[in-house]
Image: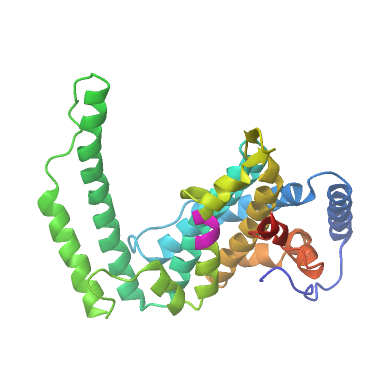
Amino acid sequence: MAGVREDADRGEHSEDDAETESALFADVAEVLHGERTLWRAAERIVTLAAPHVDEVCLGVPITAGFNGDIVSRTIVRRAHDALAAVTVAVDSPARANARVHLRAIAEDLIFVKWLLGLDAGVATQYVQRSARVEALRAVKAQQQFLPVAYRRLETDVPDLGFGDVTEALRQARDELVELCQAQGWGKRGPSVRSMAEAADLLPVYEFFYFLSSKAVHANLHEMARMVWGTDHAVDISSKPFAGVHADLAIVYGVWLFDYVLSAVMGMFEPVDRLLASQAYCVWLALILAGPARRGQMPLLIHPRELRI
């Protein structure tokens, strides 16, 4: 990972550097000797990264239009937002559901790595044509659902403000298909799996799609984990595995966040500065390198579960 490495030569330390370093390691000691170490360390990363993400994402000139550069910046923001959401969810009664946010970071990671491997002109055409299709699909979907919802609530259907987008959607899809076929991606365009293969991220795709699918789909293993009791009566709750789910969300959320930043390294100076900072490297090592060196990276399923 970008941040889990030996510190670079930092030259001579000033008094301010020494004070900053002292404060950092005092904070690390407090986190290590307190409760819920992983969660508190992840909060530190979210806070530390926030101003760097703002530098990447605020006041951005858009003279070149919606292109790969702008999409890469949005993915930096989305990854930070998702990791922040993980830390909030883990500190709530819904901590067992914190994993749902990993799907978005994993897909964004795969997409940005794939996109940055394209010719810049092709990437621009793809994001612009895809964005138009997705926007028009959203219009179509709400035009189909909202009248049903209003009628079910026994309320008049208001004017939603859109005309018939059927023809515009057809045209937008045709333009996207034309581009995809010209690039050899087929009529339906590249799948997330094919993007992962092209970006050399297939293991990431397979692991995180499975992990996040267990959290968002009807999954019988996850349901069975919620049933605890005797032969006569059971309680159904997400609490027994809430800590396991929380650790999964924190450790792999941070792993994905760092991977996203690494994917755009060299594009945005604030990201490079964050990845090279001592504080980021220390917190990242605490969350990832520590468990890895102890052979304690969070598991999707424990051997004891199969015996049960």
Instruction: Tell me if residue 16 can be seen.
Output: yes
Q: Nearer the viewer, residue 221 or 291?
A: 221
Whole-percent x, y for residue 172 in the image: 18, 59
Q: Quadrant of the C terminus?
A: bottom right
Task: Decide: is 277 above or below 87.
Answer: below
Whole-percent x, y for residue 195 in the image: 41, 73
Residue at 25% across, 24% down? 152
Q: Is residue 153 left or right of residue 23?
A: left
Task: Decide: is 246 above or below 238.
Answer: below
Q: Nearer the viewer, residue 61 or 36?
A: 36
> Quadrant of the rendered structure where residue 53 is?
bottom right
Q: Quadrant of the N terminus?
A: bottom right
Residue extending furthest toward the top: 154
Q: Looking at the image, how many numbered discs can be counted on the residues?
A: 0
Q: Does the magenta segment cover residue 142?
A: no
Task: Decide: is 11 above or below 214.
Answer: below
Whole-percent x, y for residue 244 in the image: 69, 50
Range shown magenta:
209-213
Whole-percent x, y for residue 41 in the image: 75, 51
Residue extending furthest toward the front: 231
Residue at 86% across, 71% down? 12
Q: Nearer the viewer, residue 258 or 288?
A: 288
Q: Is residue 183 left or right of residue 275?
A: left
Q: Nearer the viewer, residue 6 or 211?
A: 211
Instruction: Tell me if residue 280 can be seen.
Output: no
> Quadrant of the rendered structure where residue 143 is?
top left
Task: Decide: is 85 above or below 264.
Answer: above
In terms of secondary structure, what is the magenta stretch mainly?
helix
> Quadrant of the rendered structure where residue 188 is?
bottom left
Q: Is residue 104 left or right of residue 24?
A: left
